[in-house]
Image (cartoon, rainbow, N blue to C red):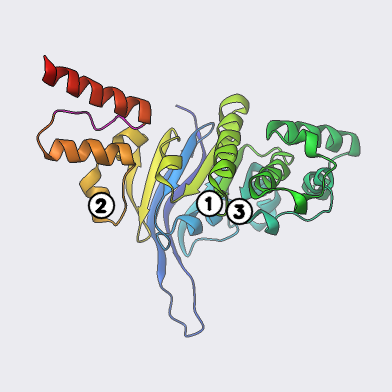
Amino acid sequence: MAKPIIEIKDVHFSYTTAEGVAPVVLDGVTLDIAEGSFVAVLGHNGSGKSTLAKHMNAILLPSGGAVYVDGIGTTDEERLLDIRRTVGMVFQNPDNQIVANVVEEDVAFAPENLGVPPEEIRQRVDDALKAVGMYEFREHAPHLLSGGQKQRIAIAGVIAMQPRCIVLDEPTAMLDPIGRADVLRTIKTLNRERGVTVVLITHHMDEAAQADRLVVMAKGKVVADGAPKEVFQQVEHLKAVGLTVPHTTELLWQLRQEGFDVPLDALSDEECALALKTLLDSRTK
């Protein structure tokens, strides 16, 4: 089994308010992220998932417990640059991450700040833009691009830093279905072809279903953890914490409630259609 690139050990976190009240946002979260894995973290707004994401590259530090990135404690200020070179962050609004007026200059910004030699920056920028399918737009103005294209540019800017792990905090929240599909395809390619560890924070069931591992959060705690096919079979448990399940799982679950023998692990449309065909064939014999 691959060694963890991120280790989260009994992490507690509270934001202090002006009144001095500190509502608990993370309540004893323990989680390891294996190097090379694709993990989705699913939960409602207020579940703690975005706060957890910000702990993964020391944007936030735990109130209790500890977070380690490649064995480095995130509270070690002298190693902060090493932590952020290892784990890159992509946020939901790409406009907040785009800093230049030309696409390739934007992607070059972070490597320049890291002191990467100019000839290597050129290579990194080209590689990163090709990785996200945006090389032909390298001389375009970012503000003229679509939301999905801007988000892919933001991802390229992180790739150019050559992190071993990318944490994406609701990267498709502001995108239309085409933009969402483009970004998801990019994320999966990075993971499968380049071996980049991916942590995808999302509230979309269909996005979570595409990961290798699914972590479900509610009220600052991890309430389920496993392969998406296993987690989504826990229909009653997920409904109890206010979450739905993919439409395919919901349909098959409803059929099971009516006494039909259908599998709950048919997540994709194709698998669900095959399960329904098998059911119909068995009843017409």
| Main SS, magenta residues | loop
Residue 124 seen in the current view: no
Q: How crowded is mark 2: few (under 14 residues within 10 Å), some or many (20 or more)?
A: few
Q: Which of marks 1 and 2 is nearer the N terminus?
A: 1
Q: How crowded is mark 3: few (under 14 residues within 10 Å), some or many (20 or more)?
A: many
Check residue 14 for magenta coloring: no
Near-viewer residue (170 or 136): 136
User: In which quadrant is the N terminus drawn?
Assistant: top left
- What's the CA distance linking mark 3 and mark 1? 7 Å
Residue that carries the numbered disc 3 in the rendered image: 91
Q: Which amino acid, by three-letter code, is at mark 3?
A: Phe
- The quadrant holding residue 74 is bottom right
Q: Which amino acid does label 1 sit on?
A: Glu
Quadrant of the image occupied by residue 21: bottom left
Q: Residue 239 carries which label?
A: 2
Q: Which residue lies furthest to the front in this view?
A: 284
Extreme residue toward the right, this view: 118
Q: Mark 1 points at which residue?
A: 170
Q: What stretch is highlighted in magenta?
A: 261-267
